[in-house]
Image (tube, grey):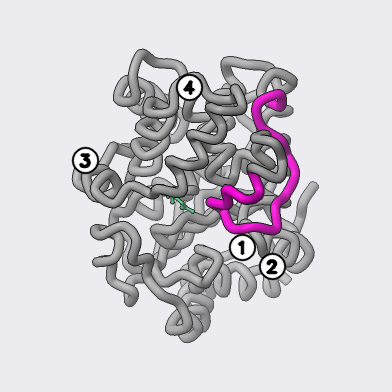
Amino acid sequence: MIKLTDININNLSLWIQQAKTQARRGKVIQRIPLLSQANSDHFAVAISFCSGDNLSLGDDSCRFPLMSVVKPFSFLYLLEFFSQEELLKWVGIQPSLMPFNSLEQLIADDGYPRNPMINSGAITIADKLPGKDASDRTQLFCQWLNKLTGSKLYLDMEMLASVRSSRSQINVAIAQYLYSQGNLQNTDLAIDTYEQICCISGTVEDLAKLGQVLACNHDYINYQNMQLVNSIMLSCGLYEISSKYAEEVGLPMKSGVSGTLITIVPNQGAIACYSPALDTFGNSVFGLEFIEILSNNFTLDKS
Ligand code: GLN
């Protein structure tokens, strides 16, 4: 058994080859026109170690929107402005066994989103972000992310236009229900902000650096906030199949419908995967397969 820090290009490329063979099972998302054009033969992995070293392999020049991988970070960002108690009045920390955009779950819970990793929770968080309008909010948030990571994440305007052109009516219904229950201040602003932050884009290396923020101790992030985000990712990050992976892999993970997946290995580093073919729950097939192979080969030091 090896630790994350012992991983080198050779074993990484072997595991990528193994994981690739499974990706044929997945399907690229069709709902967002520009994302539907993504090449399902693209596979990339990056690791950002707590030492500051980085490693990446495969189609690592691909650029993609974060989509739901942004959710742990918008929650972490808001924790910079409000206490945990205040935030937990708006959104819970319980897993859901329903899809990430379930209105049914929200209605069953009387408009209190189960957790910030599903759309109802993330739309609620988007409503509370600081900034005068959605663009201002996205810009401030993106600047914060880039300051933390030294990355060049940016808002992909073409992707945003595509998301807007095929606006998810389920997300709109979720926002309207949240508003009717007094949990949103402004439905349009919340949806606009949510769509914009989902279109913050970068490479797999940028994604690994984002994960590193949650994996390693830093002076600039409150440790309790980091712990809270990691524990919510562990139980809720992969939607309906979160508990399966919490048992099998035991690491905080978060997926997005662009085919992104980040995995946090506390005190060691973060692994980012990219491959657009998804399973029926909206998780990257390659990404999950890769992490399973990896977790069978390295020591899960969660101390
Ligand atoms: N913007 C996407 C949506 O709300 C993000 C969902 C996801 O990545 N799971 O449908």
Disc 3 crowd, CA 10 A, few/some/many (<14, 14-19, 20+) = few
Looking at the image, tell me whether mark 2 or mark 4 is earlier in sequence order. 4
In which quadrant of the rendered view does residue 213 lie?
Answer: top right
Looking at the image, tell me whether mark 1 or mark 4 is earlier in sequence order. 1
Marks 4 and 3, how far apart in space? 20 Å
User: Residue 52: horizontal and vertical position, in percent?
Assistant: 51, 42
SS for dot 1: helix
Amino acid carrying mark 1 in the image: Asp
Q: Which residue is mark 4?
A: 129
Looking at the image, tell me whether mark 3 or mark 1 is earlier in sequence order. 1
Looking at the image, tell me whether mark 4 or mark 3 is earlier in sequence order. 4
User: Residue 261: horizontal and vertical position, in percent?
Assistant: 51, 58
Q: Look at the image and tell me whether residue 299 can be seen.
A: no
| Residue 119: mark | none
Q: Which residue is mark 3?
A: 157
Amino acid carrying mark 4 in the image: Leu
Q: Which residue is mark 1?
A: 6
Whether 136 is drawn above or below 38: the answer is: above
SS for dot 3: helix
- Front-most of residues 204 and 219: 204
Q: Nearer the observer, disc 1 or disc 2?
A: 2
Residue visible at 33% across and 19% down in the picture: 133
Marks 1 and 4, how far apart in space? 39 Å
- What are the residue bounds of the magenta stretch? 88-106
| Residue 298: mark | 2
